[in-house]
Image (tube, helix red, strand yellow):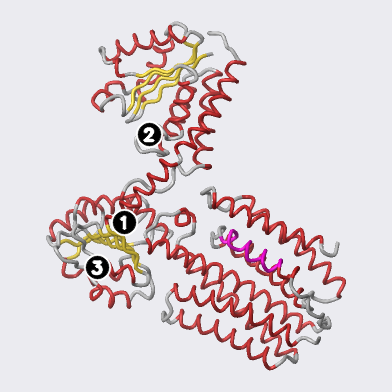
Amino acid sequence: MNIVCAGINHRSAALDIREKFAVGAHELEETLTCVRQIDGLAGAVIVSTCNRVEYYTASICPLRVLEGLRGYLQKRTGGNESAFYTHESPASVRHLFRVASGLDSMVIGETEILGQLKQAYAAAMDYGATTRHLNKLFQHAFRVAKQVRTETQITRGSTSVGSVAVDLAGKIFGDLSKLTVMILGAGEISEKTARSLVSRGVRTVIVSNRTFERAAKLAGEIGGMAVHFDNWPNAFDSADILICSTSSPTPIVTRETIEPLLARRNGRPVFIIDLAVPRDADPSLNELENVYLYDIDSLEQIVSQSLEIRRADVERCEKMIDHHVTDFVAWSRNHTDFIK
Amino acid sequence: MDRILLTGATFCLLLSFGYTLFALGAGRFRPGVVNRFAILGGFVLLTLDLWNRGHSQGACPINSLFDVLVFTSWSILLIYLVIGPAYHLSLLGAFTSPLVFLILLAAQLGPKGSTWHAQRDPWVAFHAALSLIAYGAFALAAVAGLMYLVQNRQLKNRKAGTLLYNLPPITDLGTANARLLWLGFSLLTVGFIAGHISGMQVSTLKFAASILIWAGYGAILLLRRLHHLPPKRTAEASLWIFCVAMLLLPAIQYLSSPK
């Protein structure tokens, strides 16, 4: 039994082409029914995400199935099927294992794809579109992904400034739900970082900006409160995380400003995220006890480190996957099904 | 049977320690089932060993330097098993196992010292056992303090190493460090009171050293309570004072015991 994969992803086609191929949840059953009518095809699973649309099918005559799939896609998209790549066993098996492990993703090691694969497989099962080989293949893929994630560093660290900030906040404070974030300078990047923190449980946000109206607008959007810029040192008492991104040419968060405020905090730590260029916070603040200062360079450096760690482990992941591909292909050879 | 249980316990701790080193090398610095079972196994074997020796001595088995080291190891594991999960500090085990392993190794390979007469006065036995359990808590406070210092260094250096992602949040480590110090201090205080009630006689040197250590821990906690000692300094102090206690008390005990 051969596993045939036909697909399109972020590397093979731009978004405007990918969106034409997308298979929404409302049309999945109908699409699966159409695909299963292809001559020689035993079963199918359709994976449709923002970065990829892939058809995984089981067949004993792959050429006929590939031809049938091309014909179907041509009819569906009006002749754009040339952007599609196709794989047969064992390349198709390796491809699925790589996708499940996050090795084929735009950000190496991302884990969201595994959940999407599980959903796609569950949907195909619900519609009765899977076969013994496809069941075995997908269950094997989930096992491979789990092994790769636990035994390598492919998912290690964060890959965006916002998520690094959230991770670091977690490593300083633990539970984020009782924290207060203060935004100094209502810029786009500080807003994104604050939103990342809010999405991870932070409940209280204070926004301070030279233009109070802008602070009030952002506070309204995030669900926080606005403070006049002159009053930020007073509001700092209740803040645990300070995100700065003003356009001030000189540092505004200095030792002289912060040291008297720290004395009032009874040893409560503060995490300062300085996203401004030129910097808003005096770099020497990091030497103070209970102050953890990260500027844009240090955050981006952590992002690069994480990506580097992930890339360095790709080879190890590939070796693990090769081993599993061999296992699956051997099983597949010994368990030949006939087409219904 | 005499040493089988103890050797088995030492082996369990070595296994946990070895697994930690292996996991660290493989970039998987997470407490696993191996750590948990090895520590639990070590604790069970040590409990059986103490039970056997207590039974044969007809008293709490803390009648020689060897006994003290084994009982301290048991206390550390006891406090870890009770406190560790409550504070979500399962990784504490990865740091605890090498410490207990070294203490057990020292007990087995170090000088045995003479055996003191068995403590049949219940107050004296209570005083000794409680004091050793207190040192178990102080040992774990030192371990939590060490973890705090490692995490603080990682955060200050802005390096996203394996340790940063696997150590608990620094605030939790600071809290655990302080609570373990309070626990140890409370137990030691009650132990001292029990010793006073028993009217036991100890050498002036031992008494002075014990009071000094007790006062040292008391001072740390008072300063921390008054917010004059930040968590980093508390962690450093708990580490130093424990090291001093571990060197000073066995040495005094060894020197002052009848030869």
**SS under mark 2:** loop
- Residue at mark 2: A105
Q: Position of residue A270 (x, y in %)?
A: 34, 66
Mark 3 surroundings within 10 Å by alpha-carbon count, few (fewer than 14), some (14 through 19), many (20 or more): some
Q: Position of residue A107 (x, y in %)?
A: 36, 38
User: In terms of secondary structure, what is the magenta stretch mainly?
Assistant: helix
Instruction: Give the number of the disc on residue A269.
Output: none
Residue B188, relative to residue B32: is it above or below? below
Among numbered discs 2 and 3, the one appearing first in the sequence = 2
- Whether the magenta-drawn stretch holds residue B93 is answered as yes
Q: Which residues are magenta?
A: B92-105
Q: Residue at x 67, y 91 (%)?
A: B205
Instruction: Give the number of the disc on residue A298.
Output: 1
Q: Are marks 1 and 3 in contact (CB under 8 Å)?
A: no
Mark 1 surroundings within 10 Å by alpha-carbon count, few (fewer than 14), some (14 through 19), many (20 or more): some
Tell me the amino acid under the disc marked 3. Asp
Mark 2 surroundings within 10 Å by alpha-carbon count, few (fewer than 14), some (14 through 19), many (20 or more): many
Question: Of all residues shown, which one is farthest toward the bottom?
Answer: B204
Kindly indicate whether the residues beneath marks 2 and 3 are on one polypeptide chain.
yes
- Whether the magenta-drawn stretch holds residue A320 is answered as no
Distance from disc 2 to disc 3, alpha carbons, whole Å, reads 38 Å
Depth check, front residue: B113 or A282: B113
Residue A22, quarter of the rendered image: top left
**SS under mark 1:** helix
- Residue at mark 3: A282
